[in-house]
Image (cartoon, helix red, strand yellow):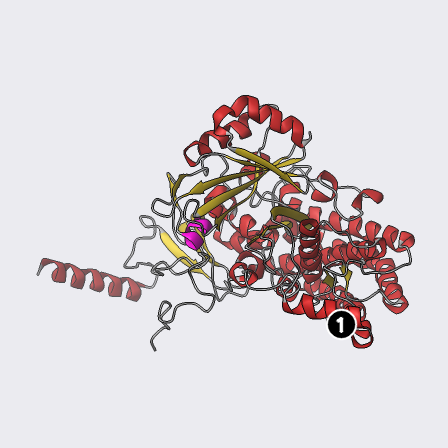
Amino acid sequence: MDNQTVLERLKSRLGNALLESREFRGELTIVVPKDRIADVCSFLKDDPELAYDFLSDLCGIDMFTPERRFGLIYNLLSLRNRHRLRIKTFVEEEDPKVQTVSGIWRTANAHERETFDMFGIVFEGHPDLRRMYMPEDFEYYPLRKDFPLMGISGSLPLPKK
Amino acid sequence: MDTKVEEITHRSRILQALEDQDTSASFLDPLESEMILNMGPQHPATHGVLRLLVKLDGETVIGCVPELGYLHRGYEKLAESCTYHEFIPHTDRLDYISPLSNNTAYTLAVEKLLGIEAPPRAQFIRTIISELARISSHLLFLGSLAMDVGALTAWMWSFREREKLYDVFENLVGARFTTSYTRIGGVVQDMTPTAESMVREFIEAFPEKLEECEKLLNRNRIFIGRCDGVGVLTREQAIDLGVTGPTLRASGVHHDLRRALPYLIYDQFDFDVPMFEGGDSLARYYQRMAEMKESVKIVRQALEKIPPGSVHAFKPHNVLPRKKQVYTRMEELIHDFMLVNFGIDPPDGEIYFSIEAPKGELGFYIMSKKGDGHPWRFKIRSPSFVNIHALPTILKGAMVSDVVAIIGSIDPVMGEADK
């Protein structure tokens, strides 16, 4: 299956949920609105022709622009068609919330926890949204662009003897 | 007042029981309570600093929560301030059992972003080292799984073979452990005839040694008993949980990125992708043993076909020049200065590239902005991270004594899972 066929099918089925599409180095990326992400993902998984049954990766991104602060990137793979597709969606800084896809692919559970830990993006409906790497009482989100590389002094207290 | 009296009578009952010597009693009734067992992060059998909270009912595991982050070094954050060349040594520290494989994956990802390709000889060398890294990683799996179920000899024998591989790496790369061998657009140095003959020697002798290890385990009643039917992961669960690599194929999914989405020169070689249906620890063991034999086949073919020529692409804006030329020629000096100080300048874009690493799908998502010498966003999709999160599903219903063996059969590496 090639990008053109996939894109045509997506255009006909997703309608106005398909905001943008871009091809770079042979990889197809589509942008969808954030309130449609769960619908689009479950369609892509269940569609008999596309069948993106494998979520390779899910990660966040800090675009650091006022209108589109955070992004979410879903790298999908169809085991049968051997085709990759990337879905992107954007959330604002004031309301960094998006629907979870952990009910569609269970592997998203861990990826979403990591994204929450690193960017503070809240996944609504996630069964167990805790921090992944950082301590539970850590106040900052390290992969945001406004978090300094050297860290913030005092944010991780050393254990007392 | 009442509780105090109750406590005294309870204690006296226990003292009485101790005097009787043929009864046992405890403050907590084991039949009525569930127990939380904390495993790790300081545990010799958890492959590093993995911490598991295991909920037990008697000896049966009824729940498990993996806790990660004890080795979190923030490589994704660090990458955002590194040039693309500077990050290569950090990839050694991801899956430190097979650094050559990570080096290859990273440089291939950056090359995809830049739209350049390494010359054929470099691609052959990369294929050879990836497969040797796979053998090295699976040998560690073999030794540690056998040791987890109580067979120490296989550990010694597999480490003897790994030691030979490290000698090969030392000759090829100059380092045994943290290799940093690949460069964007090639590899750091050509494979010398000595290194080539060492690889050949290893490959010729290795199948026999592997057979020796198999003889120890394949008909070993204790080993089979500890692995057969233990820690079953079904096909549907494996796909749903995003498990990759040998663990996925041992659950009956015929998916290998070397075949599904070929990279490097894997489409030129004749090899099989083994697959097992069992989904248990034993299937995962057979799977990796079979994969090592296929790797031997690939390396053997690659050594036969390897063409002569340069191992660096001629792309002066992206590929670091040779040191000798930097010291003697003006153009190269300028390029070296620019590449070291400002880095490569890839176009605006984003790519996701993954290879079939020994543990599974090792992928890099890179988003670059024109004018920046470093990635805007760098995401590591590490196979161990995802495979560890399949543990709660696999461990449910297992016995507590099998937990260590099941972790061993998944073969996670924390350097990669914690990034």
Q: Is B413 placed above or below A78 here?
A: below
Of all chains, the one bearing label 1 is: B
Q: Main secondary structure of the magenta part?
A: helix
Residue A138 at what x, y percent from top left? 36, 61
**Residue annotated with mark 1:** B333
Is residue A25 located in the magenta-colored stretch of the structure?
A: no
Residue B367 at what x, y percent from top left? 58, 50
* Left or right placement of residue B117 versus residue A159 in this view: right
Screen quadrant of the C terminus of chain B: bottom right
Q: Is B253 placed above or below B377 here?
A: above
Residue span colored magenta: A112-119
Residue B123 at what x, y percent from top left? 80, 54
- The single residue placed furthest to the top in the displayed view is A12
Q: Is A150 placed above or below B151 here?
A: below
Front-most of B410 and A130?
Answer: A130
Task: Name the residue: 48% across, 26% down.
Answer: A16
Is residue A113 located in the magenta-colored stretch of the structure?
A: yes
* Left or right placement of residue B89 versus residue B303 in this view: left
Give amino acid for label 1.
Answer: Leu
Front-most of B242 and B406?
Answer: B242
Residue B4 in view: yes
How many circles with numbers are drawn on the protein?
A: 1
Task: Name the residue: 68% across, 67% down.
Answer: B338
Front-most of B89 and B194?
Answer: B89
Screen quadrant of the N terminus of chain B: bottom left
